[in-house]
Structure formats: structure tokens, C-alpha cells
Amino acid sequence: MIHLEFQNIKTLRQMHYGAVLDYVTQRMKANDVAQIYDNIRKLPLPTACPKTRNKSDFTWLKEFILADTHSLKNFVTNYSNFLKFDQFRRLYNNRFSKSPSVFVDRAETFNSYTLFNSMGIKVCPYCEHEYIEVLNRGESKSRSMEFDHFYPKGDEHYPGLAMCFYNLIPSCRNCNHTKMEQPLTANPYDPAIESLTSVYPDIMDKKGIIYSTVSDDDCAISFHAKGGMVTNESTLCLEQRYQTLRPEVHRLLMARQQWPHERLDELKRMGFVIQPIIKSLFGNPSNVSKGKELHTKMKKDTIGY
């Protein structure tokens, strides 16, 4: 529902690929590497792969592990037979996501916990309805975050994509467990995802409404989805989950109606400092709070803030 964008995306990509490369070159059995290559070389990568692998060249691995969302969709749609190998799924289960003390690389610096912490995101991008975090409990850790596989890694799906960077979506447990092996069609790494949904109560489509005279129940939230977000909304039950926000949406609508831009601008011209007023009414703007606070998409679509 919100676009996953990180200022340190180049660092994140290099961390991820570097750890996978280290594992493949230093720990993986030669016959496993050969099997992976025999499948990946048949995919439409930017650099064509020869039938016989150059054992010192891992361009094919980098282009596969860091394949963008459009490439992943092409792989799944047209080349799914070459995504059945399970070496990367085993790497995901046995090292990447197994525990905070098990690592992908020999230097023991990289796993799902370190990747998530390096991302700096605090909210599930699928729903923006729940916080995601890793908690330190003395020498142990627990988490409310899970990495969802946008394209499922099960036997009947695409186990070969289990370690592809743009197939790993930091998500809340509710979204991950609701989705399970069901397909989604809007990837949070796609920059267009936020344009595929408008989240606001239908009462806003009526003219002349005085929001102080309506009830919380009149402010039921609707997901006006199109394209890939139609499937995401249905699969993740987003509209149902957002109905608990009716009182907050009602409050925001009343506040915006009582404090329109014109009134705030007038106060500013009179010399008042209006930022504390705006923050007390509406919280932080979406360009500041996205990825860190809940429901920024809903707030922006509802009151334009």
C-alpha cells in the first residue's frame, strides 16, 4: 500500500548480495551451484549466460538476486519452470531467517534481523496498520516483523526466488499469515503502488456534510483500489481491518473542516506560529511520517496531509 523506498537502498542491496555471494562461493556445494546456474542461465538476465559457467564470474548471480520487480514478474509469468530449485529456499530457512544468532556470511554480519534493522522501517508496507520491530530481550531477540515472499517460496510456487532482494517484503505477522501462499499483485517496491489505492470514507463524496453532526459509524473507510491493489486489498482484508479507525477518521474530518487551510493561513498572516497547531490537529505530514507511523496513506487521502 505504501512504496518501500530507502535512502540507503544501494547499501542494502550490496549487503544482501554480498552475503549471498559469500555463501554461494564459500559454503555451497559445487553440484548445488551448478544446478542453480543451469536454471538461472535460462532466464532473461541483462547479461547472457553461456552454457558452460565461468567459475570466476558471478555476474549471473548478482543480476538474479537483485532482479527488479518487473524482472521478477517476467520470471514468474514466463519462466516459472526454472524457479523450482530449492537451494535458496534452504538458505532462507536454515540461515537467513532461522534466528538472530545464525548468519548467511562467514563474517556473521548478515541475516534477516540485520537487514531489517538496516532498513529503518517501522510500519508494515502492505497494510500500514501495524508496527513491525525487532525487540531485544537481554541476550535474546523477538520480533513482530517477518519477511514475506511476494512470490511464494513453496514447492508449488517459486522456491528459487526465496533470496531475491525485491521478493523479500518486511511485513507484519497478520499480513504474512493472512496471505500465506496466496498471490498478491502489487509489490511495495513498485513506485506506482501508492497510486493504485485511495483510502477514505465514502461520506466524503457527499456535498454539504457537516462532520460534527454525523456519527463515527458514518465514517466507514473504503479502499478504492485498482490494478494490482484490488487483489492485495481482498487477500489481506485491508478494508475490514481499517474499520476500527472510524472514530479517528471522524476526528480528522471534523478537525479539517473546523481548521481549513484558509483559517490556518490567516493565523499565519497574523503572526501566529501555526506548526504546533497543525501537528496537534493532524500529526506529522505524510512525507515525514511514512514508514514510521501508521495510516499515513489514509490520512493523506482523507485530509490531504
Image (cartoon, helix red, strand yellow):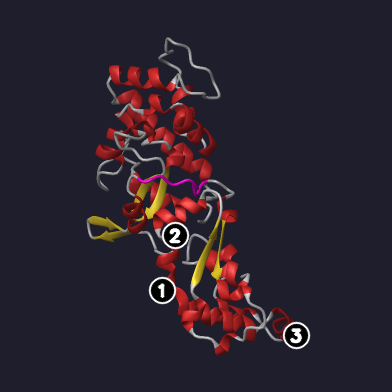
Q: For residue 153, which quarter of the picture?
A: top left
Query: On the image, numbered disc 3 is attached to which residue?
Result: 266
Q: Are marks 2 and 1 in contact (CB under 8 Å)?
A: no
Q: Which residue is mark 1?
A: 244
**Left or right placement of residue 206 versus residue 58 in this view:** right
| Count of picture labels | 3
Cα distance, mark 2 to mark 1?
14 Å
Mark 1 surroundings: few (<14), some (14-19) or many (≥20) residues within 10 A: few
Q: Is residue 184 magenta?
A: yes
* 292 relative to 270, above or below: above
In primary-sequence order, the first of circles 2 and 1 is 2
The residue lying at 35 percent from left, 23 percent from top is: 25
Residue 125 visible in the displayed image = no
Q: Callout 3: 10 Å neighbours few (<14), some, many (20+)?
A: few
The residue positioned 27% from the left and 21% from the top of the image is: 29
Which kind of residue does numbered mark 1 sit on? Thr
Depth order, front residue of 165/6: 165
Confirm whether residue 78 shows in the render: yes
Task: Identify residue for label 2.
Answer: 127
Q: Is residue 143 above or below residue 42?
A: below
Q: Is residue 280 above or below residue 118?
A: below
Q: Which residues are magenta?
A: 182-189
Circles 1 and 3, Cβ within 8 Å, touching? The answer is no
Kind of residue at disc 3: Glu
Of the numbered discs 1 and 3, the one sitting upstream in the chain is 1
Q: Measure the C-alpha gap from mark 1 to mark 3.
A: 35 Å
Amino acid type of the residue that numbered disc 2 sits on in the rendered structure: Cys
